[in-house]
């Protein structure tokens, strides 16, 4: 269980992440990452003629997928965080 201070700190971190993911720069960056992922996937059969090369390519693709999933994970965590806070407000209406 997190302390109130830890929860407040995480809320601030999430707010900063969400503001970053809402920028035009992040949007452009994520479009570039999607394009790179598609290109690496499409060229894998031709470029990866050995198992070692294929394993390296898999690692590259997984890294790009992780980067693309980072924003979604932060948004989902923020939504969950908001739901927990709303539940806390309902169960403890006298606390401020």
Image (spheres, rainbow, N blue to C red):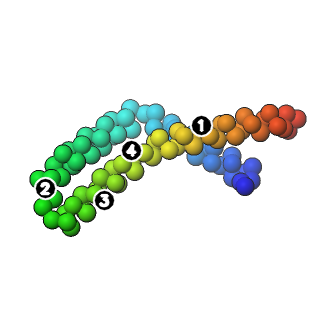
Towards the viewer: 18 or 67: 67
Gap in angstroms between the C-alphas marked 3 and 4: 14 Å
Q: Which residue does the numbered mark 1 point to in the structure image?
A: 79
Gap in angstroms between the C-alphas marked 1 and 3: 30 Å
Q: Is residue 89 above or below residue 3?
A: above
Please say if the residues under marks 4 and 1 sit with CB atoms less than 8 Å apart: no
| Residue 53 located left or right of residue 80 | left
Q: Residues within 10 Å of mark 1 (few under 14, many from 20)?
A: few
Location of the C terminus (image quadrant):
top right
Q: In the rendering, which numbered label is found on residue 68? A: 4
Q: Which residue does the numbered mark 2 point to in the structure image?
A: 47
Gap in angstroms between the C-alphas marked 2 and 1: 41 Å
| Residue 23 located left or right of residue 56 | right
Q: In the rendering, which numbered label is found on residue 59? A: 3
For residue 1, what is the image quadrant? Answer: bottom right
Q: Nearer the viewer, mark 2 or mark 1?
A: 2
Q: Residue at x 62, y 44 (%)?
A: 12
Q: SS class of the residue under badge 3? A: helix
Q: Position of residue 2 (x, y in %)?
A: 71, 54
N-terminal label among 1 and 3: 3
């Amino acid at each position: 269980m997190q302390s109130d201070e830890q929860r407040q700190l995480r809320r601030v971190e999430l707010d900063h992440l969400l503001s970053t993911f809402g920028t035009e720069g992040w949007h452009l960056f994520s479009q570039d990452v999607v394009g790179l992922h598609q290109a690496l996937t499409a060229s894998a059969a031709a470029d990866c003629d050995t198992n070692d090369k294929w394993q390296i390519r898999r690692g590259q693709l997984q890294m790009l997928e992780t980067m693309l999933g980072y924003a979604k994970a932060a948004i989902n965590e923020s939504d969950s965080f908001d739901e927990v806070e709303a539940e806390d407000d309902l169960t403890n209406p006298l606390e401020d």
